[in-house]
Amino acid sequence: MLEKALGYAHENQDRFLTELKEVLTIPSISTDPDHNPDMQRVAEWLASQLRSFGMNNVQIMPTGGHPVVYGEWMGAGKSAPTVMIYGHYDVQPPDPLELWTTPPFEPSVRGDNLYARGAADMKGPVLASLKAVEAVMKSGKMPVNIKWLIEGEEEIGSDHLGDFIKNHKELLACDFCLNPDAGIPNADQPSISTGLRGLAYFELRVYGPAKDLHSGLFGGTVHNPAQALIELIAGMHDKNGKVMLPGFYDKVRRISKKEHQNFLRSPLNKKSVLEMTGAPTLWGEPQFLPAERIGGRPTLEVNGLLSGFTGSGSKTVLPAWAMAKISCRLVPDQTPEETIRQMKKYLKEKAPKDIKWELQYLHGAGPALVSEENVGVKAMSKAMESVWGKPLLFQREGGSIGIVVQLQKYLKVDSVLTGFALDDSDVHSPNEKLHLPTFYRGIDALIHFFYNLK
């Protein structure tokens, strides 16, 4: 049956690519209310896909925000394991549009890559999962029970997913979750993620005068909010990249010797990071490897700044307010709640008395670790090594996936964190791309994975 399923997948690669392009044309941008109809369109497209290869009880289920797509196939029997397959159908905004070589929602194949917003994060991996299950279903009997949970809010923090899981514990009960929202370092190095960083995301606003002022008339007499914000942000790191929020490192778990050895094996080294980013040199805690800074250490980053006049030409204005978007990536055993308190304490201690500030917590997620001994991890490890033909790398990811912590908390199940985006896939950036040979290898690996669970 395995060879038959692999043959089906290989024979249908052109159709799989056509269907992926089809769903990538839908601009399912979850953060923008103008795209709510597109969110519904993608949910309906996914539900149709599930029904097309025999999934049962397919539903588009409401949440407090965008809907969840659910489906199941329980024909393997009570003695077989039940695997939940997770995915998300929402995508990041494509801005800045002028930096895209081709339009973000007009999928374009150039060389071995498919360029479109959502190609790697994560419509491509969702479709790989769909097509792997389709291949198995069309080639015989699926050896495991399957449940699908495909949400529409991952890119905005999965704020309603926790309540959805709590309210549907029986429906979602499973042995573990297959989550292909992670990735691998490069096309030649199969890997599974055993850790994810958490997230605390803020908007900080600083206020000064009641209105914008003429900088010639009032500069030097009124504290410029933009200057005050810059000074506050500058103080959030020392010269070596250490975060200066009070107590920020108090609960940071040390990187173990075994984890350090895995980080040493990672292709994420100084040379590769500089090649991928185009940065002139690395920055950050010098006592840690680049891979450790990405996967095993917490960070604070400024994601956006806005104040005053930013149009073309000149306008000599002293702005009334300034704003920054700030994110903290968290590692075990940090929590978003503690990070909020630490940020507020820093601002109370450091903010000058001649400005006012407001801090809004927008969303977050806790960090997560997964054991290499998990039965699903073992099955996926064997599958990827069979397809790639080389030893697997266990790595800790720098990104955040909220559902991993929510499933641990509410269903007491772990996740198999895999995926087929590469470190240079430019997720969240212009010209996001999916490496098609890795996409097809990923489908093969998922087919092996299901048969490994027999």
Image (cartoon, rainbow, N blue to C red):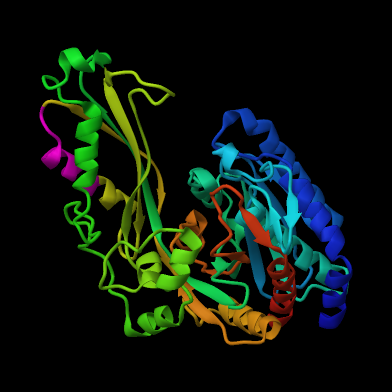
Q: Quadrant of the C terminus?
A: bottom right
Q: Position of residue 234 (x, y in %)?
A: 22, 45
Q: Is residue 419 magenta?
A: no
Specify the segment rendered in magenta: 341-353
Q: Quadrant of the N terminus?
A: bottom right
**Quarter-of-image position of residue 210:** top left
Q: How many marks?
A: 0
Which residue is pictured at 52% across the width and 80% down the height?
Answer: 393
Q: Position of residue 274 (x, y in %)?
A: 44, 65
Q: Which is the main secondary structure of the residues drawn in magenta?
A: helix
**Quarter-of-image position of residue 94:** top right
Residue 125, above or below 195: above
Q: Mark yes or no: residue 195 visible.
A: no
Q: Mark yes or no: residue 38 visible.
A: yes
Which residue is pictured at 40% across the width and 22% down the height?
Answer: 313
Which residue is pictured at 54% across the width and 71% down the height?
Answer: 185
